[in-house]
Image: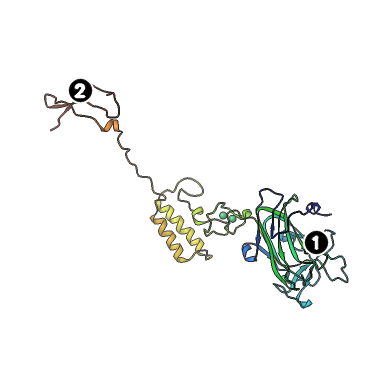
């Protein structure tokens, strides 16, 4: 049975990055697996030639299909006298043209988990005008096209060019297609890919996918632990993450020191960075009780005008409020001298 998304016509202009039917999807072409540094990679190595691959990597959450449901294989590319990025296995939508005359010029990938990015090295274009470019299209789980990227063929049998895509809207279905010069599906040469890399969404960009990130909204560039938490998130100035306030400044500094030590163990930070963090914590006001300061007297209490002299050792003043056009009190007040 064909995946639902295959029933949709693939539309769009033939450009490097094509827009999508999804109004808010932002598609970005990736040019190197280095742009997917936090991703997982399938090298297709270490399996016997002609290993059936369709369901081989379901533990990684990926299933490979052809529209006709026929098998997809892992080939030993080196034994064919050809080059690839990682020896020796590659994924191919052909076994050989003699025993597999129904080989395909497309490949579908279905991910059990929504992905944010995927790419692979491709090749086997062999300089035939009928295979002028490869298109990588991505779809939502419901089969809605989010967008496509294309890369021109370079005319050899090597698996040596990268095609990849990032989408701000997660995708679950992927389609590779070899296209001819006019942009319609090629009739020549199978899809051959290697080192397929894929990544789960990582909204705060700290390298820890959302489904494993205990601390969302990490500040960009902050060092995080394996749970996606920075030291500032684990030891916030405002109080322990469990709630409440720091008992005192010392408790905060001690928490920073302990966390810095935990980051130091797996070399997430250097000794100098740990030392600097603790010093900064010691200089901070975190955990200190706020100083109680008396509010400045109100102008109506601050300004009054002595007036007149009293008798019998006292001084008579009349309070006059400078901010109030009408004195609140007009009665004379007698203040007795104390000396
Ligand atoms: Ca390989
Ligand atoms: Ca993250
Ligand atoms: Ca995080």
Q: Quadrant of the C terminus?
A: top left
Q: Is residue 11 left or right of residue 116?
A: right
Q: Position of residue 170 (x, y in %)?
A: 67, 53
Residue lying at 35% horizontally and 44% vertically, measured from the top left: 291
Given this view, does label 1 or label 2 mark the residue nearer the observer?
A: 1
Whether ligand 1 has any atom under 8 Å from the Cβ at mark 1 is answered as no
Label 1, on which residue? 185
Secondary structure state at the residue bearing disc 2: loop
Residue 197 is at least partly visible in this image: no
Residue lying at 57% horizontally and 56% vertically, measured from the top left: 228
87 versus 236 height, above or below: below
Question: 17 or 101: nearer the eye?
Answer: 17
Label 2, on which residue? 332
297 versus 218 height, above or below: above
Ligand 3 shown in quarter: bottom right
Residue lying at 41% horizontally and 57% vertically, measured from the top left: 280
Residue lying at 54% horizontally and 54% vertically, measured from the top left: 218
Q: Quadrant of the N terminus?
A: bottom right
Q: Position of residue 337 (x, y in %)?
A: 14, 30
């Amino acid at each position: 049975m064909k995946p639902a998304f295959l029933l949709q016509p693939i539309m769009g202009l033939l450009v490097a990055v094509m827009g999508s039917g999804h109004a808010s999807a932002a598609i970005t072409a990736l040019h190197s697996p280095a742009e997917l540094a936090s991703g997982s990679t399938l090298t297709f190595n270490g399996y016997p030639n002609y290993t059936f691959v369709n369901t081989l990597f379901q533990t990684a959450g990926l299933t490979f299909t052809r529209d006709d449901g026929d098998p997809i294989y892992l080939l030993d590319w080196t034994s064919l006298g050809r080059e690839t990025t990682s020896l020796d296995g590659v994924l191919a939508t052909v076994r050989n043209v003699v025993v597999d005359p129904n080989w395909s010029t497309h490949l579908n990938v279905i991910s059990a988990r929504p992905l944010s990015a995927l790419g692979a090295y491709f090749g086997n274009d062999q300089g035939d005008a009928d295979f002028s470019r490869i298109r990588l299209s991505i779809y939502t789980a419901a089969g809605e096209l989010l967008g496509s990227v294309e890369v021109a063929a370079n005319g050899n049998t090597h698996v040596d060019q990268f095609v990849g895509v990032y989408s701000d809207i997660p995708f679950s279905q992927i389609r590779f297609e070899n296209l001819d010069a006019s942009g319609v599906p090629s009739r020549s040469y199978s899809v051959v890919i290697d080192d397929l890399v894929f990544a789960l969404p990582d909204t705060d960009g700290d390298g820890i996918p959302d489904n494993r990130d205990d601390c969302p909204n990490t500040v960009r560039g902050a060092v995080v632990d394996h749970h996606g938490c920075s030291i500032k998130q684990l030891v916030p100035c405002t109080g322990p993450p469990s709630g409440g306030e720091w008992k005192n400044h010392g408790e905060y500094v001690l928490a920073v020191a302990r966390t810095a030590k935990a980051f130091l163990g797996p070399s997430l930070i250097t000794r100098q960075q740990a030392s600097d963090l603790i010093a900064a914590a010691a200089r901070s006001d975190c955990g200190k009780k706020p100083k109680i300061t008396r509010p400045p007297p109100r102008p109506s209490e601050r300004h009054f005008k002595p007036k007149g002299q009293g008798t019998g050792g006292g001084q008579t003043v009349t309070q006059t409020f400078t901010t109030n056009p009408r004195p609140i009190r007009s009665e004379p007040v007698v203040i007795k001298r104390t000396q």
